Structures are given as C-alpha cells and as structure tokens.
Amino acid sequence: MKKRPISDETLNRIIKFLAIIVLGFGVVLLAIQFQDFWNWILRAIRAVIIPIGLAYIGALIIFPLIKYLEKKGVGPRGFSLGLVFVLTVGLIFAAFYFLTPLIINEIRNFFADDFPIIVDYINNDLRGEFIFGVDLYDRIITFINETNVIADTVDSLVPNLIASLSNLLFPLLMAFALLPILLIFYLNDYEVISERIRSIIPPKHEKNAAELASRLNQTVGAYLRGQLILMIVLGAVATIVYKLIGLKYYFFFGFLVGVTNIIPYFGLLIAAIPPIVYSFIATSGPGPLLVLVVNVVLQFFEGNIFQPLIMSHQLSIHPIVIIISILFFGSLFGTLGVIFASPIAASIRVIYRFFRDLRQEKLKNNVTEATST
C-alpha cells in the first residue's frame, strides 16, 4: 500500500490554519466596511478613558500623602483628603498666579522688541549669511514666490489645525472639568474601589491580581511622582543657568525645559531649539554655541544625575522601548498618548515581569515536586 504524502491529521491542521487566515481577512474587511462605526466607538471609549485615566494618575500621585497623614494620626479620611486636596489646588493656583504673568510679560516683550528684528534679519541679513551661498538662496526665494508654497501650506494647515484643536479641546475640557469630582470620590473610597475591582476576579486568581495591582500602583506612582519632581527641578535649574549666561527671556525658556521634559528623550531636544535659534539671531546676549553647550550639559545632568537620583534605577526603561511607545500610543491617543507613553510602557513591563515570575515560580514548584517524588 502506497503511503500518503500528507497524513489526515496534518491535512486537518492545514485546513484549520487556512480557515483561520480567511476568517481573519474577512473580519478585517468587515471592519473596514464599518470604519465610521468603529471610529464612533473609539471616540466614546476615549471620552471615558481620558477622565478616568487622569483621575487614576492623580490618585497614584496624591494617595501616598493621604496614607502618610493617616499614619501620623491626621484623620478621618475626609479630613486628610480635604487637607491634601486644598493643598494641591493651592499649589497649582499659586503656580499659575505667579508664573503666568512672568511668561506672558516675556512673550509680550518678545513680540514688541525682538520679533521685528527677526523679521528684518530673515528679509535682509539672512541672504548674505546663507551657508550654501547667495545664488542658491535667491533660487529658493524665487521658487517660493513663484509657487506660493508658503501661502498654500498655511491655507491648508490652518483649517486642519483649527479642526484638530477643536476636536481635542472639548474632550480635554470635559476631562479636566470632571477630574476633581472623580479624584475626590476615588481618593475617598480608594480601598473600597480596589476591593470591588478585585471581587470581579475569580477567587483562584484574586491573590495574583492583588499582587499585580500593587506592583502597578507602586511602579507607575513612583514614576509619576518622580517625573513631576524632575520637571520642576530641571525647569528651575535651566532658568537659573539661562539667567547666569545672560540669555534674554530666560524664564520662558526655562519653563519650556521643565514642561517639555514630560516627553522622554525628545523633550530637552525640543526645548533647546528656541533658545539656540534666538541666540543665533539676537544682537545681544550669549552666542548659539554657548547655549548649545548649556543644553548639552543639561541633557547630561538630566540623564546621569537627576534621573538616577529622582526616578531611581528600578524604573529605567530602554530608550528604544520608550521611542516605540511614544510613536504607538501617540498615534492612538494623540498628545496624551505621547505624554503618558512612559507610564504605559512601565505598566506593560510590570505586567510582563509579573507573569514571567509566575511562570518561573510554577516551573520551580514542578521541579521541586518531581524531585520529591
């Protein structure tokens, strides 16, 4: 009897595999046909996730302070919560009250004093200082004037920018309006909410779920608190250094360093561009080389001193992972995805390590049982 080249079992596996592939393509095609429906669902999910996620992040930052006060005998929960909440709101209000006039004043002075100088430089002096020569500069200007590329770009960019801001502004306003209410309820019933969430989990997995939640809260909370402190420290240091070297608008540029540091690796690079460009065009103050050196030194101190001291080594994540997270979550959630890419990546790493530890513990127990038998 001639032997079959393919057994019935192998043939069944191939057929099942092909059926899964065809079914997958069918699901993808069906999802494409109902793209508007899925976009509507995604917008609804975002509207829920953003305020709840911000409340969770705020609770991770604030709740350890409430627990600390309770351990010191400051209670009940409502009193300690009210004390911390009033203190937090007061600090935020004081920061806006004192910082906003300074920043607005520097921006107003920039447009009154330096902006005309920059426009004059672009129109006149830039031609003679163009690095690739006057001829190429004239050709570029001629091409721009003949094609109206700047006007066309502005005409197409401004409506899209306004539409994007309008689509983003309303969800953000709703999220920040609901945030204090959600945060108060979450902090007041922190343990109760955690217990209710754990009650949904089957009893046999409840212990592991509680351990995973504890690791996530500890890791992400420590990261967020460290990142907040790092932003304040780095912004203050940059402001002081910019003032010492005689850079005009040092307060705004230092504030920019602190705010953009929320974006890992790219934040300081983004914050370095405006002062370098300004020092290159400005008629007084430090030169662009000195400003560049200052920003390189800030980058060095941020990565080698401030990060290890404030964030601790246990939260270090490989730069490639951070960059991939920024690109991925930024495409999903926009600006908020870029800002919170690092804590999301840290959460994924905690989850991965938790299940890896469970698997190793299970293998260890199996080896122990096999040895004992």
Image (cartoon, rainbow, N blue to C red):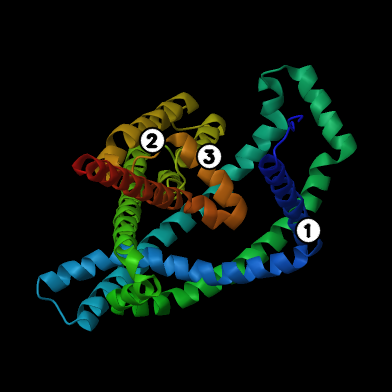
Say which residue appears at 83% left-offset and 35% top-offset: 144
Q: Is residue 181 above or below residue 91?
A: below
Residue type of the residue flagged with mark 2: Gly
Q: Position of residue 343 (x, y in %)?
A: 41, 52
The dot on residue 280 is: none
Q: How many marks?
A: 3
The dot on residue 32 is: 1
Q: Nearer the viewer, residue 153 or 322?
A: 322
C-alpha distance separating marks 1 and 3: 42 Å
- What is the quadrant of residue 116 in the picture? top right
Q: Is residue 167 above or below residue 135?
A: below
Q: Is residue 46 above or below residue 357?
A: below
Contact (Cβ within 8 Å) of mark 1 with mark 3 = no
Question: Which residue position is annotated with label 2?
Answer: 246
User: For the residue labelled by badge 2, is the local secondary structure a helix, a strand or a loop?
Assistant: loop
Q: Position of residue 342 (x, y in %)?
A: 44, 48
Q: Nearer the viewer, residue 232 or 366?
A: 366
Say which residue appears at 34% left-offset and 57% top-offset: 216
